[in-house]
Amino acid sequence: MTLSVLSVPAQAAPAGPRDVIVQLFEWNWKSVARECTSTLGPKGFGYAQVSPPQEHVTGPAWWTQYQPVSYRLESRLGTRAEFASMVSTCHSAGVKVLVDAVINHTTGGAGTGWAGSAYTHYDHPGTYASWDFHHCGRNGTDDIANYHDRWEVQNCELVNLADLATDTTYVRDRIAAYLNDLLSLGVDGFRVDAAKHMPAADIDAIKSRLSRPAYLVQEVIFGAGEPIGPAEYTGVGDVHEFRYGYDLKRVLYNEKLAYLRNFGEGWGYIGGSSAVVFVDNHDTQRNASTLSYKDGARYQLANTFMLAWPYGTPAVMSGYSFGDNDAGPPQDASGRVQDASCGAAWVCEHRSAAGMVGFHNAVRGTAVVNWWDDGGDVIAFGRGSSGFVVLNDTDGAIDRWFQTSLPAGMYCDVSGTGGCYSVNSAGWFRAVVPAHASVAIHR
Protein backbone atom coordinates (compact mmCIF):
# COMPACT_ATOMS: atom_id res chain seq x y z
CA MET A 1 0.00 0.00 0.00
CA THR A 2 1.32 3.44 -0.90
CA LEU A 3 0.19 6.97 -0.30
CA SER A 4 0.09 9.30 -3.28
CA VAL A 5 -1.25 12.67 -4.30
CA LEU A 6 -3.59 13.21 -7.24
CA SER A 7 -4.60 16.66 -8.39
CA VAL A 8 -7.89 16.84 -10.30
CA PRO A 9 -9.54 20.18 -11.04
CA ALA A 10 -12.98 20.49 -9.46
CA GLN A 11 -15.84 21.22 -11.83
CA ALA A 12 -19.50 21.79 -11.05
CA ALA A 13 -22.44 23.79 -12.39
CA PRO A 14 -24.59 25.82 -12.02
CA ALA A 15 -22.76 28.60 -10.20
CA GLY A 16 -23.60 29.35 -6.58
CA PRO A 17 -22.92 27.92 -3.13
CA ARG A 18 -25.65 25.24 -3.37
CA ASP A 19 -26.05 23.20 -6.54
CA VAL A 20 -27.13 19.68 -5.53
CA ILE A 21 -30.41 18.70 -7.20
CA VAL A 22 -32.89 16.30 -5.61
CA GLN A 23 -35.45 14.70 -7.91
CA LEU A 24 -38.63 14.45 -5.82
CA PHE A 25 -40.25 12.03 -8.24
CA GLU A 26 -44.06 12.19 -8.12
CA TRP A 27 -44.12 14.06 -4.80
CA ASN A 28 -47.22 16.24 -4.54
CA TRP A 29 -46.82 19.97 -4.12
CA LYS A 30 -47.72 20.06 -0.43
CA SER A 31 -45.12 17.38 0.30
CA VAL A 32 -42.42 19.17 -1.71
CA ALA A 33 -43.09 22.35 0.25
CA ARG A 34 -42.80 20.54 3.58
CA GLU A 35 -39.61 18.80 2.51
CA CYS A 36 -38.02 22.08 1.43
CA THR A 37 -38.63 23.48 4.90
CA SER A 38 -37.81 20.41 6.99
CA THR A 39 -34.90 18.85 5.10
CA LEU A 40 -33.76 20.34 1.80
CA GLY A 41 -33.10 23.86 3.05
CA PRO A 42 -31.44 22.88 6.34
CA LYS A 43 -29.30 20.19 4.68
CA GLY A 44 -28.04 22.45 1.90
CA PHE A 45 -29.76 21.13 -1.23
CA GLY A 46 -29.81 23.64 -4.07
CA TYR A 47 -32.74 22.54 -6.23
CA ALA A 48 -35.92 20.53 -5.83
CA GLN A 49 -36.68 18.94 -9.20
CA VAL A 50 -40.43 18.36 -9.37
CA SER A 51 -42.45 16.14 -11.69
CA PRO A 52 -44.35 17.57 -14.69
CA PRO A 53 -47.06 19.95 -13.39
CA GLN A 54 -49.26 20.26 -16.49
CA GLU A 55 -52.61 18.53 -17.08
CA HIS A 56 -51.99 14.95 -18.18
CA VAL A 57 -53.84 11.82 -19.24
CA THR A 58 -55.63 9.88 -16.52
CA GLY A 59 -54.56 6.53 -15.11
CA PRO A 60 -52.52 5.15 -12.21
CA ALA A 61 -49.15 4.54 -13.98
CA TRP A 62 -46.20 6.86 -13.38
CA TRP A 63 -45.85 7.70 -17.07
CA THR A 64 -49.28 9.32 -17.31
CA GLN A 65 -47.57 12.43 -15.90
CA TYR A 66 -45.41 12.50 -19.05
CA GLN A 67 -48.33 12.71 -21.51
CA PRO A 68 -49.52 16.35 -21.55
CA VAL A 69 -53.13 17.11 -22.41
CA SER A 70 -52.95 20.87 -21.87
CA TYR A 71 -50.64 23.34 -20.18
CA ARG A 72 -53.05 24.05 -17.33
CA LEU A 73 -51.29 23.62 -13.99
CA GLU A 74 -53.79 21.12 -12.66
CA SER A 75 -52.59 17.55 -12.11
CA ARG A 76 -52.77 14.67 -9.68
CA LEU A 77 -49.91 16.36 -7.81
CA GLY A 78 -52.02 19.41 -6.96
CA THR A 79 -53.58 22.64 -8.10
CA ARG A 80 -52.05 25.77 -9.57
CA ALA A 81 -52.43 27.55 -6.23
CA GLU A 82 -50.70 24.69 -4.41
CA PHE A 83 -47.89 24.72 -6.96
CA ALA A 84 -47.34 28.47 -6.56
CA SER A 85 -47.37 28.12 -2.77
CA MET A 86 -44.82 25.32 -2.99
CA VAL A 87 -42.42 27.44 -5.05
CA SER A 88 -42.70 30.30 -2.58
CA THR A 89 -42.17 28.01 0.41
CA CYS A 90 -39.11 26.39 -1.14
CA HIS A 91 -37.62 29.78 -1.92
CA SER A 92 -38.14 30.85 1.68
CA ALA A 93 -36.14 27.77 2.69
CA GLY A 94 -33.32 28.67 0.29
CA VAL A 95 -34.19 25.98 -2.25
CA LYS A 96 -34.76 26.66 -5.95
CA VAL A 97 -37.34 24.78 -8.04
CA LEU A 98 -36.56 22.89 -11.24
CA VAL A 99 -39.58 21.71 -13.25
CA ASP A 100 -39.57 18.57 -15.38
CA ALA A 101 -40.80 20.06 -18.67
CA VAL A 102 -42.40 17.71 -21.22
CA ILE A 103 -42.21 19.73 -24.44
CA ASN A 104 -41.23 17.19 -27.11
CA HIS A 105 -44.60 15.46 -27.35
CA THR A 106 -48.16 15.19 -26.05
CA THR A 107 -50.24 12.00 -25.87
CA GLY A 108 -50.68 8.66 -27.57
CA GLY A 109 -54.45 8.30 -27.53
CA ALA A 110 -57.76 10.06 -26.98
CA GLY A 111 -59.92 10.87 -23.99
CA THR A 112 -60.37 13.45 -21.26
CA GLY A 113 -57.44 14.74 -19.24
CA TRP A 114 -57.05 15.13 -15.50
CA ALA A 115 -58.58 18.63 -15.46
CA GLY A 116 -61.38 17.82 -17.93
CA SER A 117 -59.78 18.79 -21.25
CA ALA A 118 -60.82 16.61 -24.20
CA TYR A 119 -58.12 15.46 -26.61
CA THR A 120 -57.30 13.08 -29.43
CA HIS A 121 -53.92 11.92 -30.65
CA TYR A 122 -53.33 15.00 -32.82
CA ASP A 123 -55.89 17.45 -31.51
CA HIS A 124 -55.70 19.34 -28.24
CA PRO A 125 -58.41 21.99 -28.58
CA GLY A 126 -57.14 25.47 -27.81
CA THR A 127 -53.53 24.31 -27.80
CA TYR A 128 -52.52 22.15 -30.78
CA ALA A 129 -54.04 20.81 -34.00
CA SER A 130 -52.84 18.11 -36.38
CA TRP A 131 -50.53 20.44 -38.33
CA ASP A 132 -48.59 21.26 -35.15
CA PHE A 133 -47.14 17.73 -35.06
CA HIS A 134 -44.62 15.79 -37.11
CA HIS A 135 -46.05 12.94 -39.16
CA CYS A 136 -42.98 11.06 -40.28
CA GLY A 137 -44.81 8.27 -42.13
CA ARG A 138 -41.88 5.86 -42.18
CA ASN A 139 -42.92 2.92 -40.10
CA GLY A 140 -46.66 2.56 -40.42
CA THR A 141 -47.20 3.65 -36.81
CA ASP A 142 -44.90 6.69 -37.15
CA ASP A 143 -42.80 5.36 -34.25
CA ILE A 144 -39.01 5.62 -34.12
CA ALA A 145 -37.54 2.37 -35.39
CA ASN A 146 -33.88 3.26 -35.99
CA TYR A 147 -31.95 5.24 -33.37
CA HIS A 148 -29.03 5.50 -35.80
CA ASP A 149 -31.13 7.73 -38.06
CA ARG A 150 -30.99 11.30 -36.73
CA TRP A 151 -34.01 12.52 -38.70
CA GLU A 152 -36.15 9.64 -37.51
CA VAL A 153 -35.21 10.12 -33.84
CA GLN A 154 -36.18 13.79 -34.00
CA ASN A 155 -39.23 13.64 -36.27
CA CYS A 156 -40.92 10.30 -35.58
CA GLU A 157 -42.89 9.35 -32.49
CA LEU A 158 -41.45 8.14 -29.21
CA VAL A 159 -43.64 5.13 -28.27
CA ASN A 160 -46.68 6.52 -30.14
CA LEU A 161 -46.58 9.92 -28.40
CA ALA A 162 -47.58 12.71 -30.80
CA ASP A 163 -44.33 14.50 -31.73
CA LEU A 164 -44.57 18.28 -31.58
CA ALA A 165 -43.18 20.25 -34.54
CA THR A 166 -40.71 22.22 -32.44
CA ASP A 167 -39.21 23.59 -35.66
CA THR A 168 -42.32 25.77 -36.23
CA THR A 169 -42.90 29.25 -34.88
CA TYR A 170 -46.32 28.54 -33.40
CA VAL A 171 -45.19 25.48 -31.44
CA ARG A 172 -42.11 27.28 -30.15
CA ASP A 173 -44.25 30.22 -29.06
CA ARG A 174 -46.79 27.95 -27.37
CA ILE A 175 -44.18 25.98 -25.46
CA ALA A 176 -42.46 29.19 -24.39
CA ALA A 177 -45.79 30.55 -23.15
CA TYR A 178 -46.13 27.48 -20.90
CA LEU A 179 -42.60 27.82 -19.57
CA ASN A 180 -43.05 31.56 -19.05
CA ASP A 181 -46.20 30.87 -17.05
CA LEU A 182 -44.11 28.69 -14.76
CA LEU A 183 -41.41 31.36 -14.57
CA SER A 184 -44.09 33.90 -13.56
CA LEU A 185 -44.77 31.69 -10.52
CA GLY A 186 -41.12 31.81 -9.53
CA VAL A 187 -39.74 28.63 -11.07
CA ASP A 188 -35.95 28.74 -11.44
CA GLY A 189 -35.32 26.30 -14.26
CA PHE A 190 -36.32 23.26 -16.24
CA ARG A 191 -35.29 19.68 -16.77
CA VAL A 192 -36.05 19.26 -20.49
CA ASP A 193 -37.54 15.80 -20.96
CA ALA A 194 -36.66 13.86 -24.14
CA ALA A 195 -34.30 16.62 -25.33
CA LYS A 196 -32.54 14.14 -27.61
CA HIS A 197 -35.74 13.96 -29.68
CA MET A 198 -35.52 17.66 -30.53
CA PRO A 199 -32.65 19.36 -32.36
CA ALA A 200 -30.54 21.50 -30.05
CA ALA A 201 -31.41 24.49 -32.24
CA ASP A 202 -35.13 24.00 -31.49
CA ILE A 203 -34.51 24.01 -27.74
CA ASP A 204 -32.29 27.06 -28.09
CA ALA A 205 -35.05 28.86 -30.02
CA ILE A 206 -37.53 28.12 -27.24
CA LYS A 207 -34.99 29.23 -24.65
CA SER A 208 -34.60 32.56 -26.48
CA ARG A 209 -38.33 33.19 -25.96
CA LEU A 210 -38.18 32.86 -22.17
CA SER A 211 -39.11 35.95 -20.19
CA ARG A 212 -36.03 35.73 -17.98
CA PRO A 213 -32.92 33.56 -17.59
CA ALA A 214 -33.59 30.03 -16.39
CA TYR A 215 -31.34 27.08 -15.61
CA LEU A 216 -31.73 24.24 -18.15
CA VAL A 217 -30.85 20.56 -17.74
CA GLN A 218 -31.43 18.50 -20.89
CA GLU A 219 -32.16 14.78 -20.98
CA VAL A 220 -29.94 13.37 -23.73
CA ILE A 221 -29.50 9.62 -23.26
CA PHE A 222 -26.16 8.39 -24.59
CA GLY A 223 -26.30 5.51 -27.04
CA ALA A 224 -23.11 3.93 -28.36
CA GLY A 225 -22.68 4.61 -32.06
CA GLU A 226 -25.76 6.83 -32.29
CA PRO A 227 -25.48 10.12 -34.22
CA ILE A 228 -27.08 12.24 -31.47
CA GLY A 229 -24.98 12.72 -28.35
CA PRO A 230 -24.95 14.91 -25.24
CA ALA A 231 -22.04 17.10 -26.37
CA GLU A 232 -24.09 18.83 -29.09
CA TYR A 233 -26.51 20.22 -26.47
CA THR A 234 -23.98 21.83 -24.11
CA GLY A 235 -24.22 25.14 -25.93
CA VAL A 236 -27.88 25.40 -24.88
CA GLY A 237 -27.57 24.37 -21.23
CA ASP A 238 -26.40 21.59 -18.96
CA VAL A 239 -26.92 17.97 -20.00
CA HIS A 240 -27.48 14.71 -18.14
CA GLU A 241 -24.41 12.48 -18.42
CA PHE A 242 -26.02 9.02 -18.38
CA ARG A 243 -22.70 7.19 -18.74
CA TYR A 244 -21.78 8.28 -15.21
CA GLY A 245 -24.55 6.19 -13.65
CA TYR A 246 -24.03 3.28 -16.04
CA ASP A 247 -20.32 3.09 -15.26
CA LEU A 248 -20.71 3.44 -11.50
CA LYS A 249 -22.93 0.37 -11.45
CA ARG A 250 -20.48 -1.62 -13.53
CA VAL A 251 -17.51 -0.62 -11.37
CA LEU A 252 -19.26 -1.39 -8.10
CA TYR A 253 -20.47 -4.80 -9.21
CA ASN A 254 -17.87 -6.04 -11.68
CA GLU A 255 -14.67 -4.01 -11.44
CA LYS A 256 -12.63 -2.18 -8.77
CA LEU A 257 -13.21 1.12 -6.98
CA ALA A 258 -9.53 1.87 -7.62
CA TYR A 259 -10.45 2.41 -11.28
CA LEU A 260 -12.37 5.58 -10.30
CA ARG A 261 -9.15 7.56 -9.88
CA ASN A 262 -9.76 9.63 -13.04
CA PHE A 263 -13.56 9.25 -13.20
CA GLY A 264 -15.37 11.83 -15.31
CA GLU A 265 -13.78 13.58 -18.24
CA GLY A 266 -10.98 11.03 -18.12
CA TRP A 267 -13.59 8.44 -19.13
CA GLY A 268 -14.66 10.35 -22.23
CA TYR A 269 -17.62 12.16 -20.69
CA ILE A 270 -18.70 15.70 -21.58
CA GLY A 271 -17.02 18.54 -19.70
CA GLY A 272 -17.85 18.60 -16.00
CA SER A 273 -18.98 22.21 -16.13
CA SER A 274 -21.88 21.15 -18.38
CA ALA A 275 -22.71 17.76 -16.87
CA VAL A 276 -25.49 16.85 -14.46
CA VAL A 277 -24.72 13.43 -13.01
CA PHE A 278 -26.74 10.90 -11.06
CA VAL A 279 -26.55 7.44 -9.56
CA ASP A 280 -30.11 6.82 -10.79
CA ASN A 281 -33.24 8.57 -11.97
CA HIS A 282 -36.85 7.49 -12.42
CA ASP A 283 -36.18 5.80 -15.78
CA THR A 284 -32.94 4.02 -14.91
CA GLN A 285 -34.42 2.72 -11.64
CA ARG A 286 -36.92 0.83 -13.74
CA ASN A 287 -34.72 -0.46 -16.55
CA ALA A 288 -31.93 -1.49 -14.14
CA SER A 289 -29.25 0.25 -16.20
CA THR A 290 -27.99 1.89 -13.00
CA LEU A 291 -28.01 1.20 -9.30
CA SER A 292 -31.14 1.97 -7.30
CA TYR A 293 -32.40 1.81 -3.73
CA LYS A 294 -32.83 -1.94 -4.31
CA ASP A 295 -29.02 -2.30 -4.29
CA GLY A 296 -28.78 -1.39 -0.60
CA ALA A 297 -25.32 -0.54 0.74
CA ARG A 298 -23.73 -0.24 -2.69
CA TYR A 299 -26.32 2.37 -3.64
CA GLN A 300 -25.38 4.38 -0.55
CA LEU A 301 -21.69 4.08 -1.45
CA ALA A 302 -22.36 5.33 -4.97
CA ASN A 303 -24.21 8.41 -3.71
CA THR A 304 -21.42 9.10 -1.22
CA PHE A 305 -18.84 8.94 -3.99
CA MET A 306 -20.88 11.16 -6.32
CA LEU A 307 -21.28 13.86 -3.68
CA ALA A 308 -17.59 13.71 -2.78
CA TRP A 309 -16.11 13.62 -6.30
CA PRO A 310 -15.50 16.84 -8.28
CA TYR A 311 -17.19 16.13 -11.59
CA GLY A 312 -20.47 17.68 -12.67
CA THR A 313 -23.56 18.77 -10.75
CA PRO A 314 -24.96 15.93 -8.63
CA ALA A 315 -28.64 14.97 -8.79
CA VAL A 316 -29.97 12.70 -6.04
CA MET A 317 -33.03 10.51 -6.58
CA SER A 318 -36.02 10.37 -4.22
CA GLY A 319 -39.12 8.36 -5.03
CA TYR A 320 -41.33 5.51 -3.94
CA SER A 321 -40.91 1.75 -3.76
CA PHE A 322 -42.20 -0.35 -6.65
CA GLY A 323 -42.32 -3.90 -7.94
CA ASP A 324 -44.19 -3.33 -11.19
CA ASN A 325 -42.18 -0.95 -13.41
CA ASP A 326 -45.38 0.84 -14.48
CA ALA A 327 -46.58 1.37 -10.92
CA GLY A 328 -47.48 4.93 -10.06
CA PRO A 329 -47.02 6.63 -6.69
CA PRO A 330 -49.38 6.00 -3.75
CA GLN A 331 -52.77 7.49 -4.71
CA ASP A 332 -56.16 7.94 -3.11
CA ALA A 333 -59.45 6.71 -4.58
CA SER A 334 -59.72 9.79 -6.82
CA GLY A 335 -56.23 9.30 -8.27
CA ARG A 336 -54.58 12.15 -6.37
CA VAL A 337 -51.07 11.40 -5.18
CA GLN A 338 -50.94 10.97 -1.43
CA ASP A 339 -48.63 12.98 0.78
CA ALA A 340 -45.10 11.59 0.88
CA SER A 341 -44.41 9.86 4.19
CA CYS A 342 -40.96 8.31 4.31
CA GLY A 343 -41.13 4.61 5.11
CA ALA A 344 -42.25 1.50 3.28
CA ALA A 345 -44.09 3.26 0.43
CA TRP A 346 -41.92 6.36 0.01
CA VAL A 347 -38.23 5.45 -0.04
CA CYS A 348 -36.91 9.03 0.35
CA GLU A 349 -33.43 8.06 -0.83
CA HIS A 350 -32.24 11.65 -0.53
CA ARG A 351 -32.45 11.64 3.24
CA SER A 352 -29.77 8.98 3.59
CA ALA A 353 -27.52 11.11 1.35
CA ALA A 354 -28.32 14.42 3.04
CA GLY A 355 -25.17 14.54 5.17
CA MET A 356 -23.03 14.26 2.06
CA VAL A 357 -24.74 17.31 0.57
CA GLY A 358 -23.08 19.36 3.30
CA PHE A 359 -19.77 17.68 2.46
CA HIS A 360 -20.22 18.54 -1.23
CA ASN A 361 -20.97 22.17 -0.40
CA ALA A 362 -18.01 22.42 1.98
CA VAL A 363 -15.44 21.08 -0.49
CA ARG A 364 -16.78 22.65 -3.65
CA GLY A 365 -14.08 24.15 -5.86
CA THR A 366 -11.23 22.14 -4.30
CA ALA A 367 -9.00 19.58 -5.98
CA VAL A 368 -8.65 15.89 -5.21
CA VAL A 369 -5.58 15.28 -3.00
CA ASN A 370 -4.09 12.42 -1.00
CA TRP A 371 -5.60 9.70 -3.16
CA TRP A 372 -5.04 6.20 -1.79
CA ASP A 373 -6.32 2.81 -2.85
CA ASP A 374 -5.53 -0.81 -2.06
CA GLY A 375 -5.57 -1.74 -5.73
CA GLY A 376 -9.07 -3.10 -5.29
CA ASP A 377 -12.26 -1.99 -3.63
CA VAL A 378 -11.03 0.40 -0.93
CA ILE A 379 -10.31 4.00 -1.89
CA ALA A 380 -9.75 7.24 -0.01
CA PHE A 381 -9.19 10.81 -1.10
CA GLY A 382 -9.28 14.35 0.15
CA ARG A 383 -10.72 17.53 -1.28
CA GLY A 384 -8.11 20.18 -0.68
CA SER A 385 -7.89 21.02 3.01
CA SER A 386 -11.67 20.88 3.37
CA GLY A 387 -12.69 17.21 3.48
CA PHE A 388 -11.75 13.56 3.25
CA VAL A 389 -13.66 10.39 2.37
CA VAL A 390 -12.99 6.65 2.63
CA LEU A 391 -15.09 4.07 0.75
CA ASN A 392 -14.89 0.35 1.50
CA ASP A 393 -16.71 -1.98 -0.88
CA THR A 394 -15.18 -5.18 0.47
CA ASP A 395 -16.89 -7.82 2.59
CA GLY A 396 -14.82 -7.01 5.67
CA ALA A 397 -13.98 -4.01 7.82
CA ILE A 398 -10.72 -2.13 7.26
CA ASP A 399 -8.59 -0.54 9.98
CA ARG A 400 -5.84 1.87 8.97
CA TRP A 401 -4.43 5.38 9.21
CA PHE A 402 -5.20 7.90 6.47
CA GLN A 403 -3.23 10.97 5.40
CA THR A 404 -5.34 14.10 4.93
CA SER A 405 -4.74 17.80 4.38
CA LEU A 406 -7.25 18.73 7.10
CA PRO A 407 -6.24 20.92 10.03
CA ALA A 408 -5.82 19.10 13.34
CA GLY A 409 -9.08 18.61 15.21
CA MET A 410 -12.08 16.39 15.84
CA TYR A 411 -14.37 15.57 12.90
CA CYS A 412 -17.55 13.51 12.75
CA ASP A 413 -18.71 11.30 9.88
CA VAL A 414 -21.48 12.67 7.65
CA SER A 415 -21.91 9.69 5.30
CA GLY A 416 -24.20 7.76 7.62
CA THR A 417 -21.71 5.32 9.16
CA GLY A 418 -21.28 7.42 12.29
CA GLY A 419 -18.38 8.05 14.63
CA CYS A 420 -15.96 10.90 15.21
CA TYR A 421 -12.28 11.01 14.35
CA SER A 422 -9.26 12.92 15.61
CA VAL A 423 -6.95 14.31 12.95
CA ASN A 424 -3.46 14.94 14.33
CA SER A 425 -1.12 17.83 13.62
CA ALA A 426 0.37 15.95 10.65
CA GLY A 427 -3.06 15.42 9.09
CA TRP A 428 -3.39 11.71 9.89
CA PHE A 429 -6.37 9.93 11.40
CA ARG A 430 -7.25 6.32 12.12
CA ALA A 431 -10.57 4.85 11.00
CA VAL A 432 -12.25 1.47 11.18
CA VAL A 433 -14.59 1.39 8.18
CA PRO A 434 -17.20 -1.40 8.10
CA ALA A 435 -17.80 -3.59 5.06
CA HIS A 436 -19.63 -1.83 2.20
CA ALA A 437 -19.57 1.46 4.11
CA SER A 438 -17.81 4.81 4.14
CA VAL A 439 -16.46 7.58 6.33
CA ALA A 440 -16.63 11.22 5.23
CA ILE A 441 -15.41 14.16 7.29
CA HIS A 442 -15.16 17.84 6.46
CA ARG A 443 -14.48 21.24 7.98
Image (cartoon, rainbow, N blue to C red):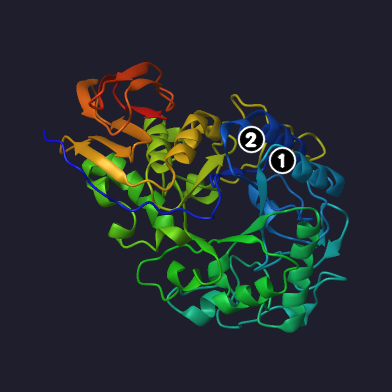
| Circle 2 crowding by C-alpha within 10 Å: few under 14, some 14–19, many from 20 | many
Q: Report if the CB atoms under discs 1 and 2 are less than 8 Å apart.
A: yes
For mark 2, what is the residue? 41
Q: Secondary structure at mark 1?
A: helix
Amino acid type, residue under disc 1 in the picture: Cys
Q: Which residue does the image show at 54% across and 47% down from the upper left?
A: 19
| x and y percentages locating residue 124 in the rendered image | 82, 69
Give the answer, above or below, for where 201 lies relative to 425.
below
Quadrant of the snapshot with the C terminus: top left
Q: Which residue does the image show at 20% across and 43% down from the upper left?
A: 5
Q: Which residue does the image show at 49% across and 40% down from the upper left?
A: 361
| x and y percentages locating residue 192 in the rendered image | 61, 62
* Inter-mark Cα distance, 1 to 2: 8 Å
Viewer-closest of 6 and 236: 6
Give the answer, above or below, for where 69 lies relative to 289.
below
| x and y percentages locating residue 263 in the rendered image | 30, 51
Quadrant of the snapshot with the N terminus: top left
